[in-house]
Image (tube, rainbow, N blue to C red):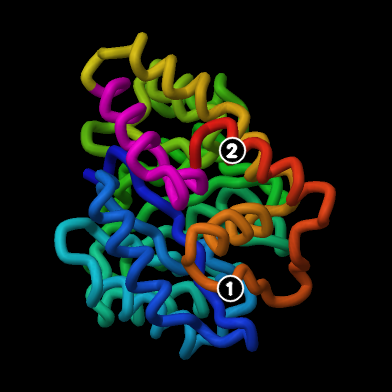
Amino acid sequence: MFRGTITAIITPFKKGGSIDEDALRRLVSFQEDNGVDAIVPCGSTGESATLSFDEHVRVVEIAVDQAKRIKVIAGAGSNSTSEAIHLSKSAEKAGADGILSISPYYNKPTQEGIFRHYEAISSSIKIPLIVYNIPGRTASNITSDTTLRLAELPGLAGIKEASGDLDQVQRIINGRPKGFAVLSGDDPLTYQMMRMGGDGTISVASNCVPDRVSRMVSMCASGAVDGAAKIHAELVPLFGALFCETNPIPIKYVMSRMGFGSGALRLPLTELTEKNRTSVDGVLKNIGL
């Protein structure tokens, strides 16, 4: 089962907009050396929406090649089931340990449509699949009933839950079969979700503070909740700063300051505003980053 701290890594770009392979490799090693359990290349934090198919596959290949001790869970979602299957098969061929697949966006499928979408993907590959529920980006919610129905499918390893509905999360935790992971998809809620019985996080913040997020998650898992609560409290200002504009705009700025890429984004995403750069810089200074 996938659990613990999983970083949704950025895709570093050079100033001209091409993939910065050196920075990407250093980022994978940085994550590995600082305690994370897995990485997700080509998620929404990795700007998958503006990567070409060939770039998408290449980023996954680089991550797989560079990772020596951690798992690689490739982002492979689409609002077209056939395209999601194509991406998933490509990730499997590249050597990924699993895939993360966002619920179909824009189409607004019914719950039955969502179920059949994932059923089709999981039956097309042999590696595990993690469902990604984020209604704020997809315009539809995967209900707890649908999640628990999906959890019974062979190959469904878990869900990245970013609905923000903790009652829904608790219903999934209470009703899931053994081995089905419930992972936080929202950094500010990771501590609370783990206290509820969750298994870890797929985190944006762990791009820049992998050691601290990993310690917090490990402490929660071992029952050292006071220590985990202290780290969570220290990181709350960072969580706020990283979502002051659309993800991954702020985290790419932070990672560029740490030497991982130029901070360049692809349109329609634009660079962090000067006002928010000043605010983010203040938070980084206060937490000693």
Percent coordinates x, y for residue 123 in the rendering: 32, 66
Q: Secondary structure at mark 1?
A: loop
Q: Tell me the residue at 29%/53% (across/down).
A: 38
Q: Quadrant of residue 35?
A: top left
Q: Tell me the residue at 22%/19% (across/down).
A: 222
Residue 203 belongs to the span the image colors magenta: yes
> Is 230 displayed left or right of 268 in the figure?
left
Disc on the earlier residue, 2 or 1: 1
- Amino acid type for the residue under numbered disc 1: Ser
Percent coordinates x, y for residue 205 in the rendering: 50, 44
> Is 72 displayed left or right of 43 in the figure?
left
Q: How crowded is the residue under tag 2: few (<14 C-alpha within 10 Å), some, or many (20+)?
A: few
Q: Which mark is residue 285?
A: 2
- For discs 2 and 1, the disc positioned in front in the rendered view: 2
> Is 40 displayed left or right of 242 in the figure?
left
- As drawn, the residue found furthest toward the left would be 69
- Amino acid type for the residue under numbered disc 2: Lys
Q: Secondary structure at mark 2?
A: helix
- Magenta stretch: give its range: 201-221
> Is 214 displayed left or right of 168 in the figure?
left
- As drawn, the residue found furthest toward the top would be 226
Percent coordinates x, y for residue 264 in the rendering: 65, 73
Q: Tell me the residue at 32%/58% (across/down).
A: 30
Q: Which mark is residue 262?
A: 1
From the viewer's side, name the closer residue of 283 and 98: 283
Q: In this rendering, does residue 163 appear at all?
A: no
Q: Which mark is residue 100?
A: none
